[in-house]
Image (cartoon, grey):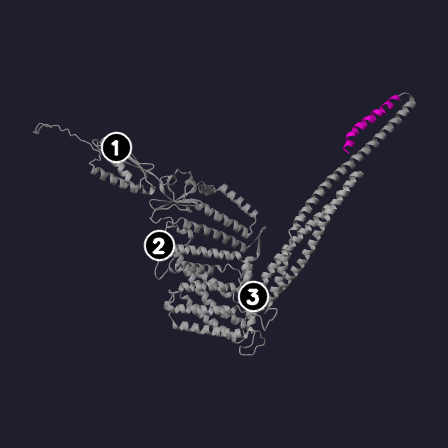
C-alpha cells in the first residue's frame, strides 16, 4: 500500500505526458476542433475516474492500517489479561479453610443451641442465652468474613471474564485483510488467540461456579446464625420485660423437666471455654496491651520501692506504702481492675478470671496488714463470691442447683448479719465497705425468696450480684487507695519535677483519695453490677446508640464514638509524653550516688521523643476516628491563614523548638548563659524552654529568643571553665620561689585538670606590687567557685609560711606645715 502511494504521482505524470502529444496534433479545422473537445472530455472523465479509484483505495488502505493497529493492541491486551487471570487463578481459593469454618459453624451451632433450641427445659436462663448469643455472634462474624472474601474473589473473576469478552468483541478484530496471504496469517493468529483464551475462560467459569457453590453454603450458614440470634434476642427481650415472672414451681414441688446435673455441667464448661477462646482470639491486641501495662506498672512500682529502700524510707508496717509492698501483685491488681472496662461485652468467664486474679493479689497484699477479724471477713466474702461465680457458670436450671443457690444465699444473709452485729468497725480502713455488706444481705435475702417461689433467673441474678457487690466494692476501694498511695509516694520522691506535668495538685494528694476517684469507682461498680441483669442491656442500648449513630454536619458524617475515640487517643498520647517528661527531667534520677549531677540519657532527646509520641498519637487518632484527609487539608489551610495574620511569633517559637531539637545547640541539663542569665537547662518544650538559674528561679524563655540570643553553652565544651586569680606580691619577693609554690599548690589540687595544664605568669609592675596571675581549668564547671575559694586559702597559707608578702595598695602622705612667729617648735 505504501508503494502504491509513493508511485501515484509518477503514474499520474506518465499518463499526462502520454496524452499531451495527441492533443497537440489535432489543432486544425472544425473537425479537428471537435476531436479536440472529445479528447478533452475523455481525458477529464478518465482523470476523475482515476482520482475516485485512488481515493477509495487510499481510504481502504487507511481503514486497513487502522484496523491492523487496533488488532495488535487488542491482542496485546488479551495476552496481558490472560496472564493476570492465570496468576490470579494460581492463588488458589481457600476452599479447605472455608469448609472448615462451615463445619465449625454446624458443630458449634449444635453446642451453642443446647439448652436454648434443644433440651430447652421448662424455661430459658439468662446466662445461657447470653453465652449462646456470644458464641453465635462470633460464628456469624467468621461466616461474614468468609462471605466477604468469597464475594470479592467472585467479583474479581467476573471482572476478568468481562474484560476477555469485551476484548474478543472489539469490531476491529472482524476487519479481515483483502490480501490472501495476509488473511491466512491473520486467521492463524486468531486461531492461536482462541486456543489460548479457551482454557483461561473455562478455568474462570469453573472457579466462578466453585465460589458460587461455597458462597451459597456460607450464606445459608449465615442465615441460620442470624435467625438464631434474632430468636435469642426475642427470648432476652421477653425475659427483660418479665423479670419477676415465675419460671418454675416452688422449690419443694416435683420437677417438670429433668436433666442430669453432670450433663448440664459438661455443656456449661464447653460453652464457657468456647466463648473464652472466641473472645480471646478476637481481642488478642487488648490482651497484649493488658500484659504490657502490667509489666510497665510493675517496673515503675519496683523502681519506686528500690528508691525507698535505698533511702531507708520504707516503713515496717507499710502504712501509706502498701502499694510498693508487693510491686508485682499491686501492678496486676491495679491494671486488671481498671482495664476490664476496656473489654467490650466480655464473656462472664473472662470476668471471673480477672476478678479471681485480682482477689488473690489483694488477699496477699492484705496479709498481716489488716486486722485478723476483717481478714477473715474478706476471705469469707471471697469464698461466697467464688462459689456464686461457679454457680453462675452453670447455664441451665436444675433442682440441685436451686438447692445449692438457696444454701449459698442463706449463708450470705447469716454471714452478713453476723458481720454487721459483731462490729469491729473501728478497725475497718474503708468505712464504705459496711454499706456494701448491708446491700449484700438485702440482695441475698431477696434471692432466697425468689428462688424458693420459682423466680429462678431473678434469684440467680441476685445471688451473684450480692457477693459481687461486696468484692468489687472492696477491690475498687483499695484500687483507688493504692493509686493514691502511688501518686503520693511519687510526689515525695520526685519532688524536684515540674508538678504541672500530671495536671494534678500533688499538695492535696494524701491518705484520702480525691473525690473524682470515688465517682469513677461508683460508675464502674454500677456497670459491673448492672451487667448481671437483662434489663441493663435494654436500658443501656439508647446510650450506646447515641454514641454509635451517624450524624451529618454539611458533607461530613461522624459519630460521637469516633470523636471520643479521637480525644481519648490524643489524650493518651499527651499523658504518655508528659509521663516521659516527668521521669526524664527529675533530679532524683539524674543525681548520682555521690550527689553530683549526672548527664541524662533520654533528657537530651526529650523533645524529639515527645514529638514522636504526639505525632504517632495524632496519626492513630485520625486513622481510628475515620476523619477524611480532605478535611485535614481544610484545617491546615485555615491554620495557614491564621499564621499569616497573627501567629507568626507562635510559629517562630515552634519551629525554633524543632531546630533546637534537631541541631541540638543546647540539651536538657546543659549549663548555659543567655543574655546574662546563667543556669541549667531544665526543659526544652515545643514553644518555650525553662532555665533554672543559680538563684533558684526558673526563667521561661521562648525558643525563638533562645535560638537568636548569644547563647553560651558551657556543657558543649566538656563542662569546663577556666578560672583566673590575680595576686599582687611585694617588690622584694623571690619571684621564682613564688612560681614554684603556686605550681605545687595547683598540681596537688585533684579538682584541677592536668590537660590543659595550669599557668602561672607575671603580668605587670604595679604601683605597690608585682602582679601575677594564675590560670587553671576545673574538671567540672560546678567546682569552679569552690575550687577558687580553696585555692585562695591555700595560697595565703603557703605565702605566710614562706614569708612572702602579699602587697596591699600603699600611699604615703607628706604634710607641709608653715611656722608662725610665736611658734618655738623646731623646724621639721
Across and down, in percent, residue 291 comes to: 48, 57
Where, quadrant-wise, is the N terminus in this rendering? Answer: top right
**Residues at badges 2 and 1 in contact (C-beta under 8 Å)?**
no
The crowding category of the residue bearing disc 3, from other C-alpha atoms within 10 Å (few below 14, some 14 to 19, many at least 20), is many
* Quarter of the rendering containing residue 434: bottom left
- Region of the chain picked out in magenta, as a range: 1-25
Earlier sequence position, callout 3 versus callout 1? 3
Secondary structure of residue under mark 3: helix
The correct choice, above or below, for 190 with respect to 23 in the image is below
Q: Judge whether residue 169 can be spotted in this image.
A: no
Q: Give the camera-side residue of 752 and 9.
A: 752
Secondary structure of residue under mark 2: helix
Secondary structure of residue under mark 1: strand
Q: Give the labeled residue for mark 1.
A: 771
The correct choice, above or below, for 129 with respect to 752 in the image is below
Position of 679 with respect to 744 (left or right) is right
The crowding category of the residue bearing disc 1, from other C-alpha atoms within 10 Å (few below 14, some 14 to 19, many at least 20), is many
Position of 552 with respect to 72 (left or right) is left
Q: Which mark is residue 263?
A: none
Position of 812 with respect to 605 (left or right) is left
- Distance in Å between CA atoms under marks 2 and 3: 51 Å
Check if residue 18 falls in the magenta segment: yes
Q: Which mark is residue 310?
A: 2
- Distance in Å between CA atoms under marks 2 and 1: 52 Å
Q: Give the labeled residue for mark 3.
A: 271
* Quarter of the rendering containing residue 724: top left
The correct choice, above or below, for 2 with respect to 238 in the image is above
Across and down, in percent, residue 112 comes to: 59, 66
Amino acid at each position: 500500500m505504501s508503494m502504491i502511494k509513493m508511485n501515484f504521482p509518477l503514474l499520474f505524470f506518465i499518463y499526462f505526458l502520454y496524452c499531451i502529444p495527441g492533443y497537440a496534433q489535432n489543432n486544425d479545422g472544425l473537425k479537428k476542433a471537435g476531436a479536440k473537445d472529445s479528447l478533452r472530455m475523455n481525458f477529464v472523465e478518465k482523470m476523475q475516474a482515476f482520482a475516485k479509484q485512488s481515493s477509495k483505495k487510499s481510504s481502504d488502505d487507511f481503514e486497513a492500517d487502522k484496523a491492523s493497529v487496533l488488532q495488535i493492541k487488542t491482542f496485546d491486551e488479551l495476552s496481558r489479561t490472560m496472564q493476570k487471570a492465570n496468576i490470579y487463578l494460581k492463588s488458589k481459593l481457600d476452599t479447605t479453610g472455608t469448609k472448615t469454618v462451615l463445619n465449625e459453624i454446624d458443630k458449634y451451632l449444635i453446642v451453642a443451641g443446647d439448652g436454648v433450641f434443644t433440651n430447652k427445659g421448662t424455661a430459658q436462663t439468662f446466662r445461657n442465652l447470653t453465652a449462646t448469643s456470644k458464641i453465635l455472634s462470633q460464628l456469624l462474624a467468621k461466616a461474614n468474613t468468609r462471605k466477604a472474601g468469597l464475594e470479592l474473589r467472585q467479583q474479581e473473576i467476573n471482572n476478568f471474564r468481562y474484560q476477555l469478552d469485551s476484548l474478543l468483541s472489539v469490531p476491529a478484530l472482524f476487519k479481515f485483510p483483502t490480501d490472501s496471504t495476509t488473511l491466512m496469517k491473520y486467521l492463524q493468529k486468531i486461531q492461536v488467540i482462541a486456543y489460548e483464551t479457551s482454557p483461561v475462560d473455562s478455568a474462570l467459569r469453573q472457579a466462578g461456579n466453585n465460589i458460587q457453590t461455597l458462597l451459597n453454603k456460607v450464606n445459608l450458614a449465615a442465615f441460620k446464625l442470624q435467625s438464631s440470634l434474632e430468636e435469642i434476642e426475642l427470648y432476652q427481650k421477653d425475659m427483660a420485660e418479665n423479670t419477676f415472672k415465675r419460671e418454675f414451681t416452688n422449690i419443694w414441688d416435683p420437677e417438670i423437666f429433668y436433666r442430669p446435673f453432670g450433663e448440664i455441667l459438661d455443656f456449661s464448661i464447653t460453652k464457657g471455654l468456647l466463648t473464652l477462646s472466641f473472645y480471646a482470639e478476637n481481642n488478642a491486641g487488648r490482651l497484649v496491651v493488658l500484659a504490657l501495662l502490667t509489666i510497665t506498672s510493675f517496673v515503675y512500682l519496683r523502681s519506686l520501692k528500690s528508691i525507698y529502700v535505698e533511702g531507708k524510707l520504707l516503713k515496717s508496717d507499710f502504712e501509706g506504702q502498701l502499694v510498693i509492698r508487693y510491686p508485682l501483685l499491686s501492678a496486676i491488681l491495679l491494671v486488671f481492675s481498671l482495664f476490664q472496662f476496656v473489654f467490650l461485652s466480655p464473656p462472664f468467664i473472662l470476668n471471673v478470671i480477672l476478678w479471681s486474679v485480682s482477689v488473690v493479689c489483694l488477699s496477699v497484699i492484705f496479709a498481716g496488714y489488716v486486722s485478723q477479724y476483717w481478714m477473715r471477713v474478706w476471705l469469707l466474702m471471697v469464698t461466697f463470691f467464688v462459689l456464686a461465680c461457679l454457680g453462675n457458670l452453670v447455664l441451665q436450671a436444675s433442682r440441685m442447683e436451686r438447692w445449692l443457690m438457696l444454701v449459698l444465699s442463706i449463708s450470705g444473709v447469716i454471714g452478713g448479719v453476723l458481720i454487721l452485729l459483731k462490729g469491729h468497725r473501728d478497725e475497718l480502713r474503708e468505712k464504705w465497705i459496711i454499706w456494701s455488706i448491708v446491700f449484700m444481705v438485702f440482695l441475698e435475702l431477696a434471692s432466697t425468696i425468689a428462688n424458693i417461689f420459682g423466680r429462678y433467673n431473678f434469684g440467680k441474678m441476685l445471688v451473684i450480684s450480692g457477693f459481687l457487690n461486696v468484692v468489687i466494692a472492696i477491690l475498687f476501694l483499695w484500687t483507688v487507695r493504692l493509686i493514691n498511695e502511688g501518686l503520693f509516694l511519687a510526689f515525695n520522691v520526685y519532688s524536684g519535677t515540674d508538678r504541672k506535668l500530671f495536671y494534678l495538685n500533688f499538695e492535696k494528694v494524701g491518705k484520702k483519695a480525691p473525690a473524682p476517684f470515688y465517682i469513677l469507682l461508683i460508675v464502674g461498680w454500677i456497670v459491673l453490677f448492672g451487667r448481671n441483669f437483662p434489663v441493663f442491656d435494654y436500658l443501656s442500648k439508647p446510650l450506646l446508640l447515641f454514641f454509635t449513630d451517624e450524624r451529618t454536619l454539611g458533607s461530613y458524617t461522624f459519630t460521637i464514638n469516633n470523636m471520643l475515640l479521637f480525644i481519648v487517643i490524643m489524650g493518651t498520647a499527651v499523658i504518655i509524653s508528659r509521663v516521659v517528661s516527668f521521669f526524664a527531667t527529675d533530679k532524683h534520677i539524674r543525681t548520682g550516688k555521690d550527689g553530683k549531677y549526672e548527664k541524662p540519657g533520654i533528657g537530651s532527646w526529650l523533645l524529639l521523643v515527645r514529638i514522636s509520641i504526639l505525632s504517632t498519637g495524632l496519626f492513630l487518632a485520625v486513622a481510628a476516628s475515620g476523619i477524611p484527609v480532605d478535611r485535614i487539608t481544610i484545617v491546615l489551610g485555615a491554620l495557614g491563614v491564621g499564621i499569616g495574620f497573627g501567629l507568626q511569633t507562635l510559629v517562630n517559637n515552634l519551629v525554633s523548638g524543632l531546630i533546637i531539637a534537631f541541631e541540638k545547640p543546647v540539651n536538657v541539663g546543659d549549663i548555659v548563659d543567655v543574655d546574662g542569665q546563667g543556669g541549667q537547662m531544665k526543659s526544652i518544650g515545643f514553644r518555650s524552654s525553662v532555665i533554672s538559674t543559680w538563684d533558684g528561679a526558673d526563667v521561661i524563655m521562648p525558643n525563638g529568643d533562645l535560638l537568636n540570643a548569644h547563647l553560651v553553652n558551657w556543657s558543649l565544651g566538656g563542662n569546663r571553665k577556666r578560672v583566673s586569680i590575680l595576686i599582687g606580691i611585694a617588690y622584694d619577693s623571690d619571684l621564682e620561689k613564688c612560681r614554684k609554690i603556686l605550681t605545687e599548690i595547683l598540681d596537688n589540687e585533684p579538682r584541677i585538670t592536668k590537660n590543659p595544664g595550669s599557668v602561672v605568669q607575671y603580668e605587670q609592675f604595679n604601683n605597690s606590687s608585682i602582679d601575677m596571675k594564675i590560670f587553671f581549668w576545673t574538671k567540672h564547671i560546678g567546682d569552679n567557685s569552690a575550687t577558687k575559694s580553696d585555692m585562695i586559702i591555700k595560697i595565703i597559707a603557703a605565702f605566710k609560711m614562706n614569708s612572702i608578702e602579699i602587697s596591699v595598695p600603699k600611699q604615703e602622705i607628706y604634710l607641709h606645715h608653715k611656722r608662725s612667729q610665736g611658734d618655738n617648735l623646731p623646724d621639721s
